[in-house]
Image: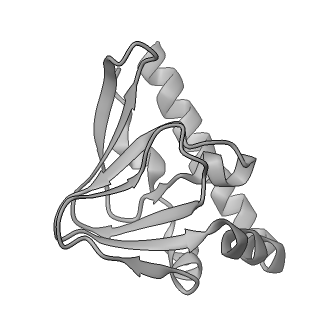
Amino acid sequence: MQLDSTAFVGDLELIKALDAHSTPVSCGSDYVLFRQDDPAAGLYIVHQGVVTLSMISQDGKSLFAVHALPGSLLGLPGVISGQPYSLSATARAGARIGFVSRDEFTALMQAHPLLSLKMLKVLAAEVRSARKALY
């Protein structure tokens, strides 16, 4: 399965709004941002560097791995749905990442409803990419 790495990228206005509410994540060495099936604590913004997204099957086999591009929003489906992360994300040493907690994210979406439409575009791109990969 091959996902389109552009599917996770948000537009500049959305990235700036989220970044204003983010805290930096230290990636002096390789750092696991989240693991598949972990509770969704927040959203991660990839500013630069390498972040690998992956998924494993129930029997432990790798289903895919893809590198996130700068501007990618990671963990969005879990944060919006309140469900566990469906992927794992590992940042390589030197990556520049921002973290927006689930509470901060919710407050931002309530205060700026038009940003929610931009979020829907990212989610829709993720769905389209997954469907194409399955096809």
Q: Residue 54: horizontal and vertical position, in percent? A: 35, 36
Question: In this view of the protein, which residue sits in the foreground, 99 or 16?
Answer: 99
Q: Is residue 43 left or right of residue 102?
A: left
Q: Quadrant of residue 17?
A: bottom right
The image shows residue 54, relative to residue 93, as above or below, that is above
Q: Residue 69: horizontal and vertical position, in percent? A: 31, 56
Q: Is residue 24 left or right of residue 84?
A: left
Instruction: Tell me what residue is drawn at x 39 percent, y 48 percent.
Output: 6
Question: In this view of the protein, which residue sits in the foreground, 128 or 52?
Answer: 52
Instruction: Tell me what residue is drawn at x 54 percent, y 44 percent.
Output: 38
Q: How many marks?
A: 0
Instruction: Tell me what residue is drawn at x 40 percent, y 42 percent.
Output: 88
Q: Residue 67: horizontal and vertical position, in percent? A: 27, 46
Question: In this view of the protein, which residue sits in the foreground, 60 or 44?
Answer: 60
The image shows residue 108, relative to residue 66, as above or below, that is below
Instruction: Tell me what residue is drawn at x 40 percent, y 65 percent.
Output: 71
Q: In the image as oriented, which residue stretches furthest toward the bottom?
A: 20
